[in-house]
Amino acid sequence: MRFAINLPAFNAFADARELADLAREAEGAGWDGFFLWDHLQTEPNGPVADPWVTLTAIAMRTECIRFGALVTPLPRRRPWKFARETATLDRLSRGRLIVGVGIGSDHWREYSAFGEAADDKAHATLLDESLAIVTGLWTGEPFSYEGTIYTVRNAQFLPTPAQAPRIPIWVAGILPHTAPLRRAARWDGVYPIHWDGHPVQPDEIREMLSYIHQYRSSGDPFEVVVAGYVGNESLTAATALLRTYAEAGVTWWQEGFLPGDTLDMVRARIHQGPPTL
């Protein structure tokens, strides 16, 4: 199991320079990853940092830690622009980017406030077409695509990302919703999250993976990413809890923070160091 820090990029964390400093400190303390939420706005309205500009700052301040956004609602991005940005950022970081994607929600009106429909089914179609386009453009070969919504005609993007065969893609999804899990099975990992903020339980992970493996054709490694918090637990209790998640199939544990938390809280947890198993 690998260990990461997971932060919202708003409120106390709406400063790209501060977040890049935290990522540098996390790398020095032995953490494996540093991930940000991807949002345009919050309610009530508060300060928000663009996650992708911030991830660029993180790439420049670190050397080995993996990083990315968990998760980017790809339906509100143009896939060709996203392909260019992520390939550039992956090369800048020498192959350390991880792309997390989902359909997003309108919980903070990040679709409807800008005149876009809050339609999960339409967003699912946009997500699947976007992933086909992004990964097609990442190949560096001439690429065309004809979808229900998007069309690409003989485009070619160079240079390619640093990682081969491509940047890893983790997909958000959780039972009882099965379509996102079938989508995740086609890619490199799954990020199950509850909207109420409660950690996903080991039994839920087992059930979810049992379903995913029915649809997984690749024998490549598959990441299972869970966010929770064990910083307040004793070493014995944290180890026992994390072992149950590892046995259920979790490969990444993220110490997750919330919009009301402070920089001091995050910095203190970072310098405690990651858990050990």
Image: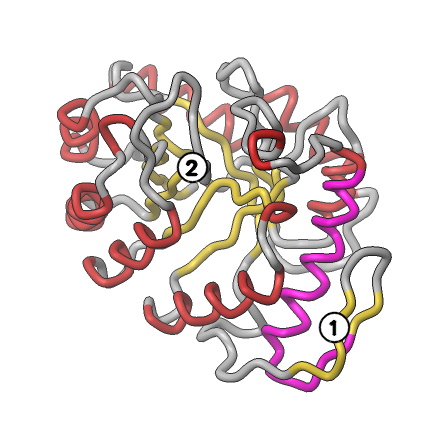
Q: Is residue 144 above or below residue 251?
A: below
Say which of 2 and 159 sits in front. Answer: 159
The amino acid type, in three-letter code, at marker 1 is Val
Per the image, label 1 sits on a secondary structure element best described as: strand
Residue at 64 percent across and 67 percent down: it is 135
Answer with mark 1 or mark 2, whichever residue precedes in sequence. 2
- Asked if residue 277 shows in the view, the reply is no
14 sits left or right of 140 in the view = left
Residue at the spot of label 2: 37
In the rendered image, residue 92, in percent from the top left (x then y), is placed at: 33, 71
In this view of the protein, can residue 177 be seen by the observer? Answer: yes
Instruction: Specify whether 187 is left or right of 4.
Output: right
Magenta stretch secondary structure, dominant: helix
Q: Which stretch did the figure color magenta?
A: 122-144
Circle 2 packing at 10 Å, graded few (<14), some (14-19), many (20+), is some
Q: Quadrant of the N terminus?
A: top left
Compared to residue 155, the image places residue 120 above or below, namely above
Q: Mark 1 — residue?
A: 152
Which residue is at 84% across, 62% downward? Answer: 147
